[in-house]
């Protein structure tokens, strides 16, 4: 039996990352014998999904990374997609580099995954160039996320904002409601549907049913994070009933270690939000 220690950096109000990731990897244990996953978290304070709170949360990166380094995990996943995307296109590389630098300073050279980077890497591995998405965010934040994805070369052909700003309220959303919400999104020209572009919005229970109904591959920030974790550990990215991404057909080689970067002290002003994304007007 091989234990794989999964380190997670999560917002203090996040309930879903520590729920859906263990559920997926426990389901994997049932079909792939000889593996066991344990989970170890460090939290960064954030209650409301606003630009100001996201900047303050990012300023806690060094402390959270140091705490995880003490547990000597095999991989570290940073689990707030919008906190990274709110800082501007490509920021996931800097965020991963900051965590890498802290870990290496503690003598720990392990893969670092961000949910933002994982989503982009998963879409690339799937060959998805046009996506539709659902977010729990207010429309300006959905626009920001869509712009970030499009900067990486993936067109967002439609988006739906559920407009929930309180992070605990996002965690309380019923994943079964996504079985109807997706019908408000135009997926006719999409290569994939991102059912939850947020690791706090529960979606795991709906991934496979919506994929079966929609006729396009369906993924979430959480399934993309698991896909990337498994790929970085050199393990087959297979989780039952979690969509095509984790069905065993899609593969991805481990990436190079991020270039270590100094941790942002969090003194930068919160970024201005764009106008609502036009396709997110539902």
Image: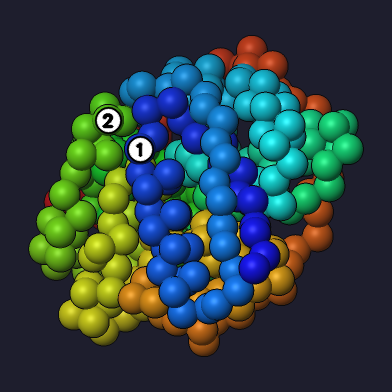
Residue 33 locus on image (x, y percent): 55, 77
Q: Nearer the viewer, residue 269 or 19?
A: 19
Q: Nearer the viewer, residue 186 or 3?
A: 3
Residue 235 locus on image (x, y percent): 65, 73
Q: Is residue 235 left or right of residue 214?
A: right
Residue 236 locus on image (x, y percent): 60, 77
Q: Residue at x 52, y 57 (%)?
A: 225
Q: Are marks 1 and 2 in contact (CB under 8 Å)?
A: yes
Q: Residue at x 61, y 44 (%)?
A: 7
From the image, tell me which residue sits under label 2.
168
Badge 2 local density, few (<14 within 10 Å), some, or many (20+)? some
Q: Residue furthest front?
A: 1
Secondary-structure class at tag 1: loop
Q: Nearer the viewer, mark 1 or mark 2?
A: 1
Q: Is residue 119 left or right of residue 258?
A: left
Residue 131 locus on image (x, y percent): 39, 68
**Structural distance between the alpha carbons of marks 1 and 2:** 8 Å
From the image, tell me which residue sits under label 1.
15
């Amino acid at each position: 039996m091989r234990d794989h220690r999964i380190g997670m950096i999560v917002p203090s109000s996040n309930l879903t990352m520590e729920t859906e990731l263990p559920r997926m990897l426990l389901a994997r244990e049932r079909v792939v014998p000889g593996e066991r996953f344990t989970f170890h978290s460090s939290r960064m304070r954030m209650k409301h999904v606003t630009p100001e709170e996201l900047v303050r949360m990012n300023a806690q990166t060094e402390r959270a990374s140091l705490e995880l380094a003490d547990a000597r995990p095999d991989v570290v996943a940073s689990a707030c997609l919008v906190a990274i995307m709110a800082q501007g296109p490509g920021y996931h590389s800097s965020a991963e580099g900051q965590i890498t630098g802290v870990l290496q300073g503690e003598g720990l050279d392990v893969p670092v995954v961000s949910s933002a980077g994982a989503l982009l890497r998963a879409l690339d591995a799937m060959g998805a160039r046009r996506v539709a998405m659902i977010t729990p965010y207010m429309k300006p934040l959905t626009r920001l996320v869509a712009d970030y994805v499009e900067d990486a070369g993936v067109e967002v052909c439609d988006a739906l904002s559920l407009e929930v700003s309180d992070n605990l309220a996002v965690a309380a959303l019923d994943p079964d409601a996504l079985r109807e919400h997706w019908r408000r999104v135009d997926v006719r020209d999409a290569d994939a549907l991102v059912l939850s572009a947020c690791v706090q919005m529960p979606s795991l229970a709906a991934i496979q049913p919506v994929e079966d109904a929609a006729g396009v591959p369906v993924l979430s920030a959480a399934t993309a994070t698991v896909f990337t974790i498994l790929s970085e550990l050199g393990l087959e990215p297979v989780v039952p009933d979690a969509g095509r991404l984790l069905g065993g057909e899609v593969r991805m080689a481990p990436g190079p270690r991020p270039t270590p970067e100094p941790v942002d002290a969090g003194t930068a002003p919160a970024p201005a939000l764009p106008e609502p994304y036009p396709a997110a007007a539902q």
